[in-house]
Image (tube, rainbow, N blue to C red):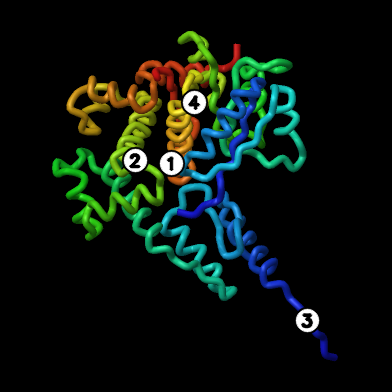
């Protein structure tokens, strides 16, 4: 017996996308047709995993060269800050240029176009985030933190912290402690 | 660079301030969609609706009738489905202790209401940009604390 089938590609794709994204536990928005906004950090492994899962259905992620490069810039910066015991002595611009094989001007322009902030600001933000984590973990003193992250002095760290957050490191610590204290 | 507009919700009982804010947001690079409510009760009713379109960032005036900003803040931070919203508290003035208390109660950002449009625009752009970094890099939003007072 012959059946005539009509299908709606749009709803089909959306359903598959939702299933796969939910399977991976990702936070996302399905915007216009052909576009998914991943609302969280998305690693290269997860990207590959998703691409593989979708290709079973004949769906392919189209890479935007720009966002791939920006993600690389972010990855290099984060690696530089979190993994190297002491940050490289050479300037950050040289470091990025060498690792990514583009002029710094090109990288900087692209970065601010995509992220709405500059590479310098991004680096400071990431460093201060690490400072916050280290303050909360209470394993290091502020002086030790400033040495670990290559600040010229504790004062330099405190100044940058205050400039970035509007709070001193001790105010920040006090607020987090009060938040975690059980209700009285 | 294309992306889905950020949803902004503003709770303020002053009509001029609401207009001020809406205009300022229109001039920021990052695309936003701004909704407003007039007081704390309207705010909580909106947020607690079954299929409410939750904002990414909520701007909350401390002094509002029916339910003030602090009460709303407390309720929101104790409601599971609302916990990912970034909350910006703003006030015309507050002591160090009050500011600290709003952070302890779970606010992410505290700003002192500026008097001129240009300053407001810069502040909002700054806040939204930083919030954007938190959302796109998977940073821990519980550590997102920002106090802007000087003008």
Mark 1: which secondary structure?
helix
Query: In terms of depth relative to the viewer, which is nearer, A156 or B40?
Result: B40
Q: Residue at x 25, y 58 (%)?
A: A100
Residue for badge 1: B133
Q: CA distance from mark 4 to mark 3?
A: 54 Å
Q: CA distance from mark 3 to mark 2?
A: 52 Å
| Tags 4 and 3 both on a single chain | no
Mark 3: which secondary structure?
loop
Q: Quadrant of residue A132?
A: top left
Q: Chain of mark 3?
A: A
Q: CA distance from mark 1 to mark 2?
A: 8 Å
Disc 3 vs disc 2: Cβ atoms closer than 8 Å? Answer: no
In the displayed structure image, the side of residue B136 where residue B47 appears, left or right: right
Q: Residue furthest right?
A: A1
Q: Residue at x 51, y 52 (%)?
A: B3
Q: CA distance from mark 2 to mark 4?
A: 18 Å
Disc 4 vs disc 3: Cβ atoms closer than 8 Å? Answer: no
Q: How many marks?
A: 4
* Image vertical order of residue A56 relative to residue A64, above or below: below
Q: Which mark is residue B109?
A: 4
Q: Which mark is residue A5?
A: 3
Q: Which mark is residue A184?
A: none
* Image vertical order of residue A83 relative to residue A48, above or below: above
């Amino acid at each position: 017996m012959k059946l005539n089938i009509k299908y709606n590609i749009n709803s089909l794709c959306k359903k598959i996308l939702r299933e796969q994204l939910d399977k991976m536990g990702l936070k996302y928005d399905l915007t216009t047709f052909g576009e998914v906004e991943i609302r969280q950090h998305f690693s290269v492994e997860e990207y590959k995993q998703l691409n593989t899962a979708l290709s079973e259905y004949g769906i392919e992620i189209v890479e935007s060269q720009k966002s791939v490069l920006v993600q690389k810039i972010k990855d290099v910066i984060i690696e530089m800050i979190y993994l190297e015991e002491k940050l490289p002595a050479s300037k950050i611009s040289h470091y990025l240029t060498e690792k990514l094989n583009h002029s710094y001007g090109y990288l900087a322009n692209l970065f601010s176009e995509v992220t709405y902030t500059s590479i310098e600001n991004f680096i400071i933000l990431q460093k201060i985030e690490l400072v916050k984590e280290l303050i909360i973990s209470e394993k290091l003193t502020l002086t030790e933190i400033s040495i670990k992250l290559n600040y010229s002095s504790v004062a330099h760290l405190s100044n940058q912290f205050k400039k970035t957050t509007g709070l001193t490191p001790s105010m920040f610590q006090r607020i987090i402690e009060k938040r975690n204290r059980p209700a009285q | 660079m294309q992306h889905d507009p950020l949803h902004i919700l503003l709770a303020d009982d002053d009509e001029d301030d609401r207009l001020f804010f809406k205009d300022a947001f229109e001039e920021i690079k990052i695309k936003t969609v701004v909704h407003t409510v007039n007081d704390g009760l309207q705010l909580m009713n909106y947020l607690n609706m079954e299929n409410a379109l939750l904002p990414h960032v909520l701007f909350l005036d401390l002094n509002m009738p029916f339910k003030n900003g602090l009460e709303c803040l407390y309720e929101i931070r104790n409601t599971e489905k609302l916990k990912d919203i970034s909350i910006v508290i703003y006030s015309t003035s507050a002591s160090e202790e009050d500011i600290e208390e709003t952070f302890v109660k779970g606010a992410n950002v505290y700003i002192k209401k500026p008097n001129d449009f240009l300053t407001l625009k810069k502040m909002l752009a700054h806040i939204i940009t930083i919030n954007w970094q938190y959302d796109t890099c998977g940073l821990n939003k519980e550590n997102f604390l920002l106090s802007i007072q000087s003008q």
